[in-house]
Amino acid sequence: MTRLREFRPLRPSSLTGMQIHDSIVDAIGNTPLVRLSRVHPPGNLVAKVEHMNPGGSVKDRIGVSMIDAAEQQGLVKPGDTIVEPTSGNTGVGLAMVAALRGYKLVCVMQDKQSKEKQDLLRAYGAEVVICPTDVAPEDPRSYYSVADELASRPGHFRPNQYDNPANPAAHVASTGPEIWEQTDGKIDVYVAGVGTGGTISGTARYLKSQKPDLVVVGVDPEGSIYTAERDEDVTTYLIEGVGEDFWPTTYDPSLTDRYEMVTDAEAFAMTRRLAVEEGLLVGGSCGMAVEGAIRVADEDHSKLVVVILPDSGRSYLSKIFNDEWMRENGFPV
Ligand code: PMP
């Protein structure tokens, strides 16, 4: 007791240079850039490792920006329920803000999303509603329709990451400037998977404002609308969080200079290589993005290529990192 009472800080914290965040959402961003020279020996490919955000993905950035914008516009107030269709990561970004600011959260998910992602959201206190993957977006059972219905109830608010300017804006404000500073303005090519398109569009908008001849490459799963040549090429695929079956307004395709299409098998093989060769346990959309980025980086080894790695492999231990699941789905292990 005496020792406790005797303890006094030498100076107030503002003068000691202590670095303390007021809450966990203040720790979002400033993720590291890491050279991927084991899977790409020429050394001109670097990755922005977004699972080092506190909620474990790039989507932490938009959880805060979408709720901040809605609060400023008076669309939502503490005690209300936030409803969002999510592949999981946006749900976590929203869950952190909901916990801190007193909102309830309902996450509407497709049944192809991993069990880990569902459990994770429940652990943050969210309610999870599961919908079938293999139905059209306009089908009343689809996760978009179910979320629409829930959001139409009083006291419910849907941030709608597919149609919310605060989604790409978060990347104009943070991801883009971070990459610019971390590469000292030397980035030549920016590569990202495209889901809502918020990450690629916002980051590209900032980077192109600094360097108009920067090349932006979108990586897309085979079966997604962004690279499908015909309607019948739009089919289901197993990579989570990227590709779509409709064009969201958050995606500005005019900022994407070209695409690389990657199959599930290529994406998952690279995801596994990143873990065992780079020590980077990341998700399937990361393997997909790196597969596309290596093709681009190999075209000119003097160009610095930056690829976004959106989330962690911990969400896929029962899938991509599970030999049985891989074999059942026809992938070599
Ligand atoms: N990868 C994963 C795992 C994701 O959850 C998302 C978000 N849907 C993305 C990539 C793509 O990001 P964006 O929606 O900003 O295009």
Image: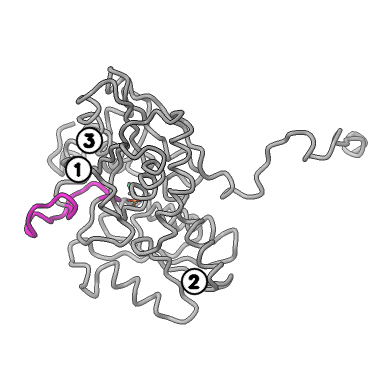
Q: Earlier in the sequence, mark 3 or mark 1?
A: 1
Which residue is labeled 1 in the image?
Answer: 259
Mark closer to the observer (3, 1): 1
**From which residue to which does the magenta span run?**
224-242
Indicate the amino acid at tag 3. Gly
Most foreground residue, 266 or 29: 29
Q: Position of residue 21 (x, y in %)?
A: 65, 44
| Dominant secondary-structure state across the stretch colored magenta | loop
Tell me the CA gap for discs 1 and 2: 38 Å
Disc sitting over residue 81 in the figure: 2
Q: Position of residue 252 (x, y in %)?
A: 30, 55
Residue 273 on the magenta segment: no
Q: Could you tell me how many numbered marks the image carries?
A: 3
Q: Is residue 264 left or right of residue 72?
A: left
Residue 240 on the magenta segment: yes
Indicate the amino acid at tag 1. Tyr
Q: Position of residue 229 (x, y in %)?
A: 8, 52
Residue at 49% over, 71% down: 81
Q: Secondary structure at mark 2?
A: strand
Q: Earlier in the sequence, mark 1 or mark 2?
A: 2
Q: Could you tell me if the residues under marks 3 and 2 are in contact, i.e. CB atoms within 8 Å?
A: no
Tell me the CA gap for discs 3 and 1: 8 Å
Q: Secondary structure at mark 1?
A: strand
